[in-house]
Image: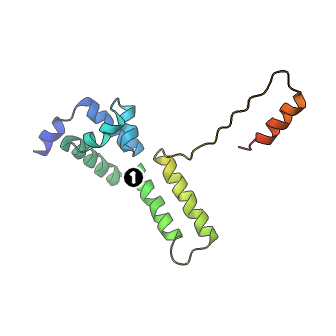
């Protein structure tokens, strides 16, 4: 029965599953393989796709490869250990770093602030330099 289910997986569904195994995010995998982000959970829930993903993960685990899911679980463990009952500021920094890395891996980035500056072309260049220096950020 299971081998029949695997045969029912389409090429595009297999590409979706492979992309999901790489990135760990259903929505991103759907978008990269031509599906809509809203359809991601539905396609992942299909028995043929689900079985394909489970078998691929089993193969990865047997080989001992650190896939995205393992990395995310390790980061989750770091956060839990860092925020135990007796944590200090260093533990909090460690937890924040782990959460930040986890967010990056899942495609959740912090919002960036964008400011628009309208400057008259005939303006004094010293004023322009002052404005640029005022809004300049170190990256």
Question: Residue drawn 73% across and 32% down?
Answer: 117
Q: How many marks?
A: 1
Residue 115 visible in the snapshot: yes
Residue closest to the eye, 110 or 55: 110
Question: Callout 1 environment at 10 Å: few (<14), some (14 to 19), or many (20+)?
Answer: some
* Residue at the limit of the structure toward the top, as seen here: 122
* Residue furthest out toward the bottom: 86
Q: Position of residue 6 (x, y in %)?
A: 18, 39
Q: Quadrant of residue 123?
A: top right
Q: Residue at x 57, y 58 (%)?
A: 97
28 displayed left or right of 7: right
Depth order, front residue of 130/42: 130
Residue 27 position in % (x across, y down):
38, 40
Quadrant in which residue 41 is drawn: top left
Residue positioned 26% across, 39% down in the render: 43
Q: Secondary structure at mark 1?
A: helix
- The image shows residue 1 at horizontal and vertical percentages of 9, 45
Rendering colour mode = rainbow
The image shows residue 38, relative to residue 34, as above or below, that is below
Q: Residue at x 28, y 45 (%)?
A: 53
User: How far across and how far down the image is residue 25, in percent?
Assistant: 39, 44
Residue linked to disc 1: 69
Q: Quadrant of the C terminus?
A: top right
Is any atom of residue 65 visible in this view?
A: no
């Amino acid at each position: 029965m299971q081998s029949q289910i695997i045969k029912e997986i389409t090429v595009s569904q297999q590409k979706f599953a492979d992309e999901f195994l790489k990135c760990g995010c259903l929505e991103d995998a759907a978008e990269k393989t031509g599906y809509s982000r809203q359809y991601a959970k539905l396609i992942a829930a299909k028995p043929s796709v689900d079985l394909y993903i489970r078998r691929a993960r089993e193969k990865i685990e047997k080989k001992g490869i650190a896939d995205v899911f393992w990395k995310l679980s390790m980061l989750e463990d770091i956060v839990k250990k860092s925020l135990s009952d007796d944590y200090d500021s260093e533990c909090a920094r460690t937890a924040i770093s782990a959460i930040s890395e986890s967010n990056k891996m899942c495609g959740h980035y912090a919002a960036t602030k964008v400011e628009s500056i309208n400057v008259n072309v005939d303006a004094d260049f010293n004023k322009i330099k002052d404005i640029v220096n005022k809004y300049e950020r170190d990256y």
